[in-house]
């Protein structure tokens, strides 16, 4: 029997009136307009691993659903009434206005509670917040998409963008590493990315298990399998901060300028609006000025990684 504590169809979520127009994300003053609560229903839940699930959300109100927009790399605040809210990267296509996908790891109080909800549960979202990957700027170039572990979740949004605008880009390589084969996420989409969208996929695990026929090692080992013109290549790197140092250092030595490497830096974000100061690095708020930074900016942020 399902635990009915998590089925909350009648609970109202206090919020201000919704924005009547789509926010202009190019203006920081617009950040206040994104602090709106959108009532959502969880329409589907997919278990990816023992620690990760993919949640599909639908904004209930049709008008609000049509207003909501985001750009690849942005995040939202997901609220489970009675438990609190957490910042989560948006892991779906920004051209799909019917639903949002969030890949969530069971890691704390709120996310543990989310792992017990059922389809039909009502939640709320605020956002979108933060900066985005400059996808238009990358037009006409090669792109390296590099993910470690759960880093593939925020990488899916720019991946969808590239899929939907494939003719705007030249060679696209995706490098994806995990601790072991059981921790690789979205394996059911690998053939689609390779066969349909003409993206060259390279995978590697640190520890192989029985039946694994792929590469074993660290993610930088995959650079031995690719070649690229450093003058016409952009890189997007998502994963644990320790990975940034090794991957971006390699790309820097290979000749890719630091302002053509972009990382998603999720550092103790809590409110999404620069109010709580938990994500502050020097005078920089990763929730407002980030989470997407070029690597030159990251190198100039003390203790950013």
Image (cartoon, helix red, strand yellow):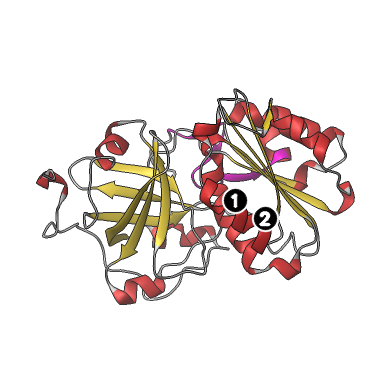
Q: Which residues are magenta?
A: 278-295
Residue hosting label 2: 194
Q: Which mark is residue 190?
A: 1
Tell whether position 221 is magenta: no
Residue drawn at x 54%, y 61% is 71
The residue positioned farthest toward the top in the image shown: 207
Residue drawn at x 56%, y 25% is 209
Residue drawn at x 55%, y 28% is 180
Which quadrant holds residue 115?
top left
Q: How packed is label 1: few (under 14 Cα within 10 Å), some, or many (20 or more)?
A: some
In this rendering, the answer to whether 192 lies above or below 257 is below
Give the x, y percent position of residue 196.
65, 63
- Taking the image as shown, residue 124 lies to the left or right of residue 169, namely left
Give the x, y percent position of residue 244.
66, 32
Q: Quadrant of the C terminus?
A: top right
Q: Secondary structure at mark 2?
A: helix
Give the x, y percent position of residue 127.
40, 56
Q: Nearer the viewer, residue 134 or 51?
A: 51
Residue drawn at x 49%, y 62% is 70
For the residues labelled 1 and 2, say whether their Cβ atoms are less than 8 Å apart: yes
Q: Secondary structure at mark 1?
A: helix
Label 1 to label 2, Cα distance in Å? Answer: 6 Å
């Amino acid at each position: 029997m399902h635990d009915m504590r998590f089925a909350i169809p009648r609970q109202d979520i206090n919020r201000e009136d919704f924005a009547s127009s789509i926010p202009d994300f190019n203006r920081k003053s617009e950040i206040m307009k994104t602090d709106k609560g959108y009532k959502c229903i969880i329409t589907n839940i997919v278990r990816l691993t023992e620690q990760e699930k993919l949640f599909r959300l639908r904004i209930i109100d049709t008008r609000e659903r049509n207003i909501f927009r985001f750009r690849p790399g942005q995040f939202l605040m997901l609220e489970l009434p009675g438990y609190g809210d957490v910042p989560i990267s948006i892991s779906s296509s920004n051209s799909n206005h019917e639903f949002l996908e969030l890949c969530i790891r069971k890691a704390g109080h709120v996310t543990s509670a989310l792992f017990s909800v059922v389809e039909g549960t009502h939640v709320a979202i605020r956002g979108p917040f933060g900066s985005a990957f400059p996808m238009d700027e990358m037009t006409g170039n090669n792109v390296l998409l590099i993910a470690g572990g759960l880093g593939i979740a925020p990488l899916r949004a720019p991946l969808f963008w590239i899929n939907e605008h494939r003719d705007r880009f030249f060679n696209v390589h995706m490098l994806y590493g995990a601790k072991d084969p059981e921790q690789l996420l979205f394996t059911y989409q690998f053939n689609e990315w390779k066969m349909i969208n003409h993206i060259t996929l390279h995978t590697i695990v640190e520890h192989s298990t029985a039946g694994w026929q792929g590469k074993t090692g660290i993610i930088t080992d995959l650079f031995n399998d690719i070649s690229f013109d450093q003058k016409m290549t952009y890189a997007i790197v998502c994963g644990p901060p320790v990975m940034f140092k090794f991957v971006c250092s390699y790309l820097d030595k290979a000749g890719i300028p630091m302002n053509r490497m972009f990382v998603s830096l999720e550092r103790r974000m809590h409110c999404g609006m620069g109010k709580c100061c938990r994500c502050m690095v020097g005078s920089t708020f990763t929730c407002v000025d980030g989470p997407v930074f070029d690597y030159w900016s990251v190198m100039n942020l003390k203790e950013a990684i």
